[in-house]
Image: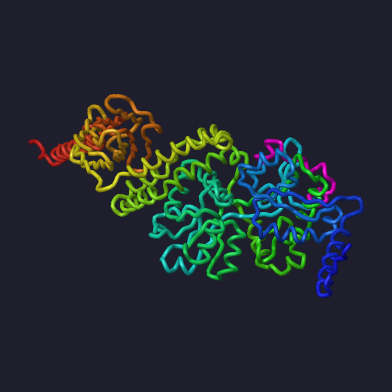
């Protein structure tokens, strides 16, 4: 048999390979097979790469026989099926709402059962700035925060100044007309493509309420370029492509390092602090190895890895700042302290979970997919800003008013997540309705209908995409009426504004003699001086009647008082004249 000869110049290389293999294998306890841990995550490769490298150096990893880690990063909607199928050892990163949904499907183990993990869990604070950092479900500890984050926006000061934009301090600042530019100077991300931007939208919906929240989210997005990932949006603000971008805190800190012109801002009193979870999963292939990894991530050493300059994240443990890495980051310690002192909104994670799918896919259908039509409509509304402030306010509300109620969103939430056919149908409906609404926002001049009554003029105005004719005021019937006409089958919208000293009380609106339903066919608001009715319909020719229970009287309310004053003045004058005659009459002889 011919012998295989190894050339002398290759021998050192081969010896090195053998030596490395021997060293690696020698770390695995005798009798224990090499383990490849599988982690499902929403974290990016820069995070997973650092934690894998540092963890595999530890005695924890070698004792558990772990030689490699596989990270899987599917979209959040695929997590339940992948965990349920088995083979996933750890779930890591993605926000409380995602992990709460996994817990609801009984896909997370009770961490209380692991003494290995609980040694570090006990060092994690229960709350941070009022936000829970541990989740108990029916007495089981289903997840623990591995890092904390706040939500805000990053401002590129140079670009902001160049385009003469105000510095934002709160979420609703970004929905103001002053931020409208072409091209847009604000950056946001399509909801299904960013858990952090979705969380910001959810914060606005809970902080301002469902209707006002959607108005702010919609108009902010009308002022924005919509990106398809948080890193894209971050890159845009760092490069000065936009002046402001919604960001999670560590993206903001990273932007400040990359470009000193950038500043991360937490909206004062309007944000929340998130604990970013880690959990043990059911059907794990390597339970002991999973516990070792979770223990490391929650340890003081593991927590310090978040503070590397390539990550710039806040640990959940304050003592991580005592480590060598932590002592190099006074900037993060300052942000940690600022974040801890934040007084934000009352955020309901359970409510967020009950709406998550509806919010994500509603945003995509009505804002992302219909963005061009939304921007055009917003520009037309802004044109009214200096012409008719009342009409501007009403149309702004109409533009952002959601097509579904909070209750409807909750009712379909599960189907939106689990039934692709149902989701596609709803998104198609929402998209068509949104485009129709945006395209039919009234434009042009406001029609003025002066009502002259008892010497006083009351100005009633109408802003409509219909022709408004045959206006009439009936004091006897306590109503105003008019006709609206438009191209048959298209959507009509008329905003009628009535002085509150002309017609008031309880209102009813009729179209062609039939009563309309408030908050379905029309909305009613009051701005302090006027009642404003926002009426929608399908075009042909319609007779609209707005009836109140109180109307301006036939004589102004001050007329009787004036008459009484005149009569009283006359009586006093007559009395004085008679008294004067009596006192000055000559004596009788």
* Residue farthest front in this picture: 1
Nearest the eye: 494 or 183? 183
User: On the picture, is 454 further left or further right than 69?
Assistant: left
Residue at 27% in and 31% down: 544
Tell me residue 105's x, y (percent). Answer: 68, 36
* Residue farthest top in this picture: 514
Residue at 68% in and 58% down: 47
Q: Quadrant of residue 433?
A: top left
Q: What range of the chain is rendered magenta? A: 100-121
Main secondary structure type of the part rendered in magenta: helix
Residue at 83% in and 52% down: 34
Q: In which quarter of the image is residue 247?
A: bottom right
Tell me residue 306's x, y (percent). Answer: 70, 60
Dividing the image into 4 quarters, which one contains the N terminus? bottom right
User: On the picture, is 325 further left or further right than 78?
Assistant: right
Is residue 106 in the magenta section?
A: yes
Q: Height in image: 359 above or below 14?
A: above
Dividing the image into 4 quarters, which one contains the C terminus? top left
Residue at 75% in and 45% down: 280
């Amino acid at each position: 048999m011919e012998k295989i000869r190894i050339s002398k110049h290759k021998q050192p290389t081969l010896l090195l390979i053998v030596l490395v293999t021997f060293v690696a294998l020698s770390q695995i306890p005798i009798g224990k097979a090499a383990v490849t841990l599988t982690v499902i995550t929403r974290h990016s490769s820069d995070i997973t790469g650092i934690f894998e490298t540092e963890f595999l150096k530890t005695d924890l990893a070698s004792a558990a026989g772990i030689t490699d880690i596989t990270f899987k990063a599917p979209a959040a909607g695929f997590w339940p099926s992948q965990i349920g199928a088995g083979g996933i050892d750890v779930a890591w990163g993605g926000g409380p709402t995602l992990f709460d949904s996994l817990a609801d499907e009984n896909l997370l183990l009770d961490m209380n059962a692991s003494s290995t993990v609980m040694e570090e869990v006990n060092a994690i604070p229960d709350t941070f700035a009022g936000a829970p950092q541990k989740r108990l479900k029916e007495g089981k500890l289903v997840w623990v925060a591995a890092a904390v984050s706040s939500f805000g926006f990053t401002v590129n000061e140079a670009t902001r100044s160049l385009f003469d934009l105000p510095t934002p301090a709160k979420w609703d600042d970004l929905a103001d007309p002053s931020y409208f530019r072409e091209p847009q100077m604000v950056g946001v991300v399509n909801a299904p493509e960013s858990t952090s931007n979705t969380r910001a939208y959810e914060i606005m919906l809970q902080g301002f309420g469902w209707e006002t929240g959607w108005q702010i989210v919609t108009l902010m997005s009308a002022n924005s370029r919509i990106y398809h990932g948080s890193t894209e949006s971050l890159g845009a603000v760092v490069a000065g492509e936009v002046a402001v971008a919604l960001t999670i805190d560590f993206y903001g800190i990273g932007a400040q390092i990359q470009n000193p012109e950038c500043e991360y801002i937490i909206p004062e009193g309007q944000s929340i602090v998130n604990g970013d979870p880690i959990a043990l999963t059911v059907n794990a292939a390597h339970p002991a190895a999973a516990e070792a990894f979770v223990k490391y991530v929650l340890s003081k050493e593991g927590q310090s890895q978040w503070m590397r300059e390539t990550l710039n994240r806040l640990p959940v443990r304050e003592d991580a700042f005592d480590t060598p890495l932590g002592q190099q980051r006074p900037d993060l310690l300052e942000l940690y302290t600022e974040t801890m002192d934040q007084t934000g909104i009352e955020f309901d994670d359970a409510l967020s979970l009950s709406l998550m799918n509806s919010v994500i896919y509603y945003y995509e259908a009505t804002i992302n997919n219909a963005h061009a039509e939304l921007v055009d409509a917003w520009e037309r509304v802004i044109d009214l800003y200096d012409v008719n402030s009342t009409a501007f306010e009403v149309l702004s509300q109409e533009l952002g008013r959601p097509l579904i109620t909070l209750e409807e969103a909750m009712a379909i939430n599960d189907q939106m997540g689990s039934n692709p056919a149902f989701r596609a149908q709803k998104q198609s409906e929402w998209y068509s309705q949104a485009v129709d609404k945006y395209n039919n926002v009234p434009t042009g001049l406001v029609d003025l209908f002066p009502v002259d009554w008892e010497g006083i003029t009351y100005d009633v105005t109408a802003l409509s995409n219909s022709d408004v004719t045959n206006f009439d005021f009936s004091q006897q019937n306590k109503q105003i009426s008019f006709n609206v006409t438009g191209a048959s089958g298209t959507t009509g919208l008329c905003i009628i504004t009535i002085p509150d000293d002309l017609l008031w009380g309880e209102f009813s609106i009729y179209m062609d003699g039939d009563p309309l339903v408030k908050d379905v066919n029309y909305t009613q608001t009051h701005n302090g001086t006027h009642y404003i009715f926002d009426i929608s319909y399908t075009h042909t020719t319609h007779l609209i009647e707005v009836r109140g229970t109180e109307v301006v009287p036939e004589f102004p309310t001050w007329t009787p008082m004036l008459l009484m004053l005149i009569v009283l003045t006359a009586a006093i004058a007559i009395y004085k004249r008679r008294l004067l005659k009596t006192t000055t009459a000559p004596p009788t002889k």
